[in-house]
């Protein structure tokens, strides 16, 4: 019988075991949440359905069934409504593939999510394995990165799961410093662009954090002017082409958002101050996590406590708080530490310091808030989607010489650290979501007349966002504009109808836009 060392050093097993662990993770993490028959949709009746709407809108636009991508049929007649929130363009082709193969609206959304989890796993695995030549450690990092319990606090915001570009960008960044090869400049630039197209929040965090990390890494490598090689006579045209294409792609994406910001304005620091993490939030898991003792004892004193699920698991947390002790130990023992270890531990720890608020309300984040784009970010704990990978690289760098015989035990610890109970998960029955969508479509279809340029649904008996998304889905499938609309924010004159969903708010919006009430189909579900 082969020993553990023989198994882990065998090339055949090095290819088989990661695949087996991956499929086990898809079952344990994805299918236990979705149900083996795909019976459940992760998230609530709000943002999860909103993300599904955005993916479907992009699919319809790509197939020529929507005239203009940015001007979707909600919050009628306000233009450019997609730019009020995420657009989902980066991963929409994945969703569109399933729709093109004949899968339903909701099922394609579920399959899209499984693919996203898969890409998260394999991107982390390949980068860590490439970096450290330890596929056993690559499995550990990939499991935490793809199937971490930190995800559970994000399930009402499913777009935040898209982070498979993060490992690629950081790997490309180090190779840029090491080699100055053009292909790594391309991986870095296009990786950031695709991440922006996928999730703008993560795009900003990835851009700033990776640039900071590269600067620190270049300093420790003593290769301060690595970028000069990209602008030598024989490479400058190719470098400018890569940078130029990236900027053009970013301009097409950012231009609608800049236009919206001119209308709606930017967030003030006071608006987001209450969402900055405190020491409690880094120990506050979602309810579905097996760490129930932490969930019950570390809820932050914040009116937005449900946005403070920052606990990443005990292993990453202990790794974070022990980083300074490793620095001291290395200095005392005069250890030879690689530039990668210094760069990743220093940059990660500093970033966490900047995203921390003291008990009396002080935070260094006030300085970061002045960076371009940061004043559009509301939920601060989302920075962990990038720093989680940085922290994992730091941990692996520190323990990379650990004997392979520890791998099985380490995986067991990682597995238990990220265990959860699916019955405590925020999820909805797919059949209920499907029936609800079909009922609303039927009501609108049966009552709409030629004189109606749009429709509105009023229902004060349920949460406003549920009614708005009901209407948006009907508008999407019937290709009829709706006054209803849900997004991260909206026009000031739409706010009363948005929040209270009543006739008074509807009348105010119609009057503001000089729209006759007779030209609107008004469906009252609260009678």
Image (cartoon, rainbow, N blue to C red):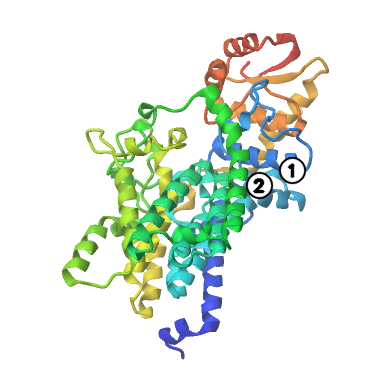
**Image disc number at residue 92:** 2
In terms of image quadrants, where is residue 270?
A: top left
Q: Are marks 1 and 2 in contact (CB under 8 Å)?
A: yes
**Count of numbered tags:** 2
> Residue sitting at 55 percent across and 54 percent down?
191
**Image disc number at residue 62:** 1
Q: Is residue 276 visible?
A: yes
Point out residue 111 in the picture as x, y percentages from the top left corner: 64, 53
- Residue 286 falls left or right of residue 327: right
Question: On screen, 269 above or below 527?
Answer: below
What's the distance in space between the residues labelled 1 and 2, CA to CA? Answer: 9 Å
Front residue of 385/295: it is 385
Point out residue 58 in the picture as x, y percentages from the top left corner: 69, 41
In terms of image quadrants, where is residue 68?
A: top right
> Which quarter of the rendered picture does the C terminus lie within?
top right
SS at circle 1: helix
> Residue sitting at 45 percent across and 46 percent down?
205
Question: On screen, 433 above or below 342?
Answer: above
> Within 10 Å of the Cα at label 2, are there few (<14), some (14-19), or many (20+) other Cα atoms?
many
Front residue of 57/21: it is 57
> Within 10 Å of the Cα at label 1, are there few (<14), some (14-19), or many (20+) other Cα atoms?
some
Q: Earlier in the sequence, mark 1 or mark 2?
A: 1
Q: Residue furthest right?
A: 450
Question: On screen, 19 above or below 287?
Answer: below
Q: Residue furthest bottom?
A: 1
> Residue sitting at 58 percent across and 28 percent down?
259
Q: Is residue 429 visible?
A: no
Point out residue 146 in the picture as x, y percentages from the top left corner: 49, 58
Point out residue 393 in the picture as x, y percentages from the top left corner: 39, 63
């Amino acid at each position: 019988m082969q020993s553990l060392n023989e198994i882990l050093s065998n090339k055949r097993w090095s290819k088989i075991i990661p695949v087996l662990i991956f499929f086990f993770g898809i079952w344990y993490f994805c299918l236990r949440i979705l149900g083996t028959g795909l019976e459940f949709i992760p998230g609530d009746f709000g943002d999860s359905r909103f993300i599904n709407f955005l993916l479907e809108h992009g699919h319809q636009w790509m197939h020529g069934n929507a005239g203009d991508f940015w001007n979707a049929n909600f919050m009628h007649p306000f233009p450019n409504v997609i730019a009020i929130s995420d657009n989902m363009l980066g991963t929409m082709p994945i969703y569109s593939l399933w729709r093109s193969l004949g899968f339903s609206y909701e099922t394609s959304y579920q399959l899209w999510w499984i693919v996203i989890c898969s890409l998260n796993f394999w991107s982390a695995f390949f980068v860590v394995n490439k970096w450290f030549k330890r596929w056993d450690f690559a499995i550990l990092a990939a499991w935490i990165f793809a199937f971490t319990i930190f995800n559970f606090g994000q399930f009402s915001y499913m777009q935040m799961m898209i982070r498979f570009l993060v490992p690629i960008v950081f790997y490309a960044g180090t190779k840029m410093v090491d080699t100055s090869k053009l292909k790594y400049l391309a991986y870095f630039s296009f990786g950031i662009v695709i991440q922006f197209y996928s999730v703008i929040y993560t795009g900003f965090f990835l851009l700033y954090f990776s640039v900071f990390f590269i600067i620190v890494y270049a300093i420790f490598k003593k290769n301060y002017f690595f970028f000069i090689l990209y602008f030598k006579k024989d490479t400058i045209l190719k470098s400018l082409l890569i940078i130029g294409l990236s900027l053009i792609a970013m301009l097409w994406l950012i231009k609608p958002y800049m236009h919206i910001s001119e209308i709606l304005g930017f967030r003030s620091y006071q608006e987001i101050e209450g969402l900055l993490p405190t020491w409690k939030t880094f120990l506050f898991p979602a309810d579905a996590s097996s760490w129930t003792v932490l969930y019950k004892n570390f809820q932050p004193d914040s009116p937005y406590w449900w946005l403070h699920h920052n606990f990443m698991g005990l292993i990453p947390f202990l790794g974070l708080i022990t980083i300074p002790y490793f620095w001291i130990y290395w200095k005392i023992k005069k250890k030879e530490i690689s530039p990668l270890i210094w760069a990743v531990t220093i940059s990660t720890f500093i970033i966490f310091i900047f995203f921390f608020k003291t008990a009396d309300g002080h935070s260094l984040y006030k300085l970061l808030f002045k960076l371009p784009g940061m004043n559009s970010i509301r939920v601060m704990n989302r920075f962990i989607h990038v720093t989680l990978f940085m922290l994992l690289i730091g941990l692996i760098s520190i323990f990379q010489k650990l004997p392979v015989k520890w791998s099985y035990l380490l995986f067991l610890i990682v597995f238990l650290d990220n265990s959860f109970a699916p019955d405590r998960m925020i999820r909805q029955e797919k059949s209920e979501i499907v029936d609800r969508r079909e009922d609303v479509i039927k009501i609108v279809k049966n009552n709409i007349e030629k004189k109606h340029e749009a429709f509105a649904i009023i229902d004060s008996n349920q949460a406003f966002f549920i009614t708005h998304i009901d209407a948006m889905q009907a508008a999407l499938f019937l290709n009829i504009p709706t006054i209803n609309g849900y997004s991260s924010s909206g026009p000031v004159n739409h706010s009363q109808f948005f929040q209270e969903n009543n006739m008074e708010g509807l009348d105010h919006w119609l009057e503001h836009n000089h729209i006759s009430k007779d030209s609107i189909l008004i469906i009252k579900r609260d009678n």
